[in-house]
Image (cartoon, helix red, strand yellow):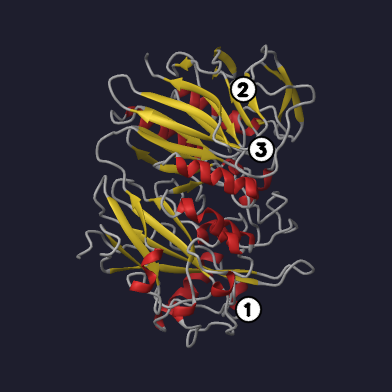
């Protein structure tokens, strides 16, 4: 088969890489990007993509194996790989496959995966039938070295492969397998590793997408993934705090950090993410300060996200894509957070200006009925972290201006949903099962932080109120963070639905003369705990 797509480099092709193999005096005078370019140039001349490394998959548990391989099959006793010698390719089993859309979900897909050792010439094979995979599409290998943290862990080497598939046919199911020299997914012995994905249709059709934040590695996270997959989503939105390798989340090198938690997480999420595009943004626990001053080197190494953002290398969690009649905008709220200011002002206002332009463009598009915005820190919540005044100051006026239909946050490990808000006040009450019109009523904000991490609580004496468990409505005592990092008390009349259980959002988008977003929150047992509709002009 002749592949109808190109082999252009994946988006975000230059993650920061530490100074392995660079003379120390030279390394001190170079930026992280310059170090990466130096190494890449040297290694390209030697016709290899591998760097010095060691096993990165030792933490994988048997229950996390996505292809039936045991942990032993993912480990090796070989010494460090090098440009002139590495472990036999047949002994190195890929794991942690995860998909992401390119800038156009109809024609572009990014396939990413992890290998426990450096490999030669990683690639993807793709076709329209599982037993007829076509020519190899080259992938890029990104090496990530985490330096030693004395008293905590030794240095860790990890390897992530990324392939960019462009020129795909809309509305088509493709089958793919990932491999490298010595490991070919098209061989009879490897056909069980072949998986599939579907590109977005060329014309709007009804579809479902799911969302949550604050997942981590746990039985609850696995349970959410299983129920989520049963919804057959076209894509999944992850609102940040992805795996909690950084357990403190302050964006500082003093945080406790173990990068091997990523191995566990990618193996855990693989049964979903290998077929459902897993669209992530950046939470405070995803600022990993050991790679670059802004902490985003790890995110750039592990993910290939759309290049539609205003600054994809500097702010990888900010991007947009349109699927069917829904425009999605992902944002990096670390840039505006008053509560956790490690990256406050990171973009110097450029992200907010890009957001204004992007929302305006989506609203001007005749093909877009609904605009959904995703980011981590809460604009409106009454749980443990409460609301971030920085988000409110920078972005809420833009959501009002452009009549955004739905805002999805994480950060607080609960489910909480507001009424429709305009200018911070209730424009219309939206009880369970109600309908709202953003052109008239305001924006509904959802905290979907029950992805799997340990749960939070609401203020003392404040009861849960959700579908089948409703009580009389009253104001909730809460607060928001100020620029001075003070907690400014407030009473939240807008807190409409609350649920202290693991959960996720399931959103059905239906086009037509009267398009509708049907928004539901489901527990990890699959029980509905909230639902409402968004109808524009209806």
**Above or below — where is 188 with respect to 533?**
below
Which of the 4 quarters of the picture holds residue 448?
top right
Residue placed under numbered mark 1 in the picture? 24
Residue placed under numbered mark 2 in the picture? 466
Q: Is residue 386 left or right of residue 211?
A: right
Which of the 4 quarters of the picture holds residue 468?
top right
Horizontal and vertical percent position of residue 97: 46, 59
* Labels 1 and 2: the sequence-earlier one: 1
Horizontal and vertical percent position of residue 41: 43, 76
Label ID, residue 70: none
Q: CA distance from mark 3 to mark 2?
A: 16 Å
Q: CA distance from mark 1 to mark 2?
A: 58 Å
- Which of the image's four quarters has the C terminus? top left
Disc 1 crowd rating (10 Å Cα; few below 14, some 14-19, many 20+) is few
Helix, strand or loop for disc 2: loop
Q: CA distance from mark 1 to mark 3?
A: 43 Å
Q: Is residue 343 visible?
A: no
Label ID, residue 413: 3
Horizontal and vertical percent position of residue 394: 57, 32
Q: Is residue 242 left or right of residue 362?
A: right
């Amino acid at each position: 088969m002749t592949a109808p797509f190109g082999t252009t480099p994946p988006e975000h092709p230059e993650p920061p890489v530490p100074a392995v193999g660079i003379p120390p005096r030279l390394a001190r005078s170079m930026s992280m990007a310059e170090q990466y370019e130096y190494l890449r140039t040297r290694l390209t001349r030697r016709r290899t993509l591998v760097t010095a490394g060691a096993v990165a998959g030792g933490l994988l548990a048997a229950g996390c194996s996505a292809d039936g391989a045991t942990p032993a099959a993912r480990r090796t006793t070989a010494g460090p790989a090098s440009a002139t010698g590495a472990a036999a390719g047949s002994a190195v089993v890929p794991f942690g496959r995860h998909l992401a859309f390119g800038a156009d979900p109809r024609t572009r897909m990014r396939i990413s995966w992890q290998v426990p050792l450096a490999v030669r010439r990683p690639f993807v094979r793709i076709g329209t039938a599982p037993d007829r995979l076509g020519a190899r599409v080259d992938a890029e290998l990104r090496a990530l070295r985490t330096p030693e943290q004395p008293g905590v862990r030794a240095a860790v080497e990890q390897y992530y492969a990324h392939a960019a598939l462009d020129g795909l046919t809309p509305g088509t199911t493709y089958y793919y397998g990932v491999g490298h020299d010595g490991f070919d997914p098209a061989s009879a012995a490897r056909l069980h590793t072949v998986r599939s994905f579907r590109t977005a249709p060329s014309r709007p059709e009804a579809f479902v997408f799911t969302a949550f934040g604050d997942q981590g590695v746990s039985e609850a996270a696995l349970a959410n993934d299983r129920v989520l997959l049963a919804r057959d989503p076209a894509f999944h939105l992850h609102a940040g705090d992805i795996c909690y390798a950084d357990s403190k989340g302050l964006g500082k090198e003093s945080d406790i950090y173990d990068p091997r938690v990523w191995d566990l997480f990618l193996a855990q999420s693989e049964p979903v993410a290998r077929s459902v595009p897993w669209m992530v943004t950046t939470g405070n626990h995803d600022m990993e300060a050991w790679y670059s001053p802004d902490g985003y080197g790890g995110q750039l190494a592990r993910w290939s996200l759309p290049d539609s953002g205003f600054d994809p290398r500097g702010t990888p969690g900010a991007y947009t894509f349109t699927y069917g009649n829904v425009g999605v905008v992902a944002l990096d709220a670390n840039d505006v957070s008053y509560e956790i200011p490690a990256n406050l002002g990171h973009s110097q206002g450029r992200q907010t200006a890009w957001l204004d332009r992007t929302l305006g463009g989506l609203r001007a598009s005749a093909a877009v009925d609904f605009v959904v915005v995703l980011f981590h820190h809460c604009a409106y919540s009454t749980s443990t972290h409460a609301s971030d005044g920085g988000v409110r100051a920078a972005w809420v006026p833009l959501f009002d201006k452009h009549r955004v239909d739905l805002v999805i946050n994480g950060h607080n490990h609960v489910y909480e949903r507001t009424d429709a808000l305009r200018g911070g006040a209730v424009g219309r009450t939206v009880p369970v099962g109600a309908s709202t019109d953003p052109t008239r009523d305001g924006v509904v904000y959802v905290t979907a932080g029950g992805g799997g991490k340990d749960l939070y609580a609401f203020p003392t004496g404040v009861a849960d109120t959700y579908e089948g468990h409703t009580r009389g409505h009253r104001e909730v005592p809460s607060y928001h963070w100020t620029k001075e990092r003070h907690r400014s008390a407030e009473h939240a009349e807008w807190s409409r639905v609350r649920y202290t259980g693991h959960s996720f959002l399931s959103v059905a988008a239906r086009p037509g003369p009267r398009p509708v977003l049907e928004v539901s929150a489901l527990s990890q047992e699959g029980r509905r705990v909230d639902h409402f509709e968004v109808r524009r002009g209806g």
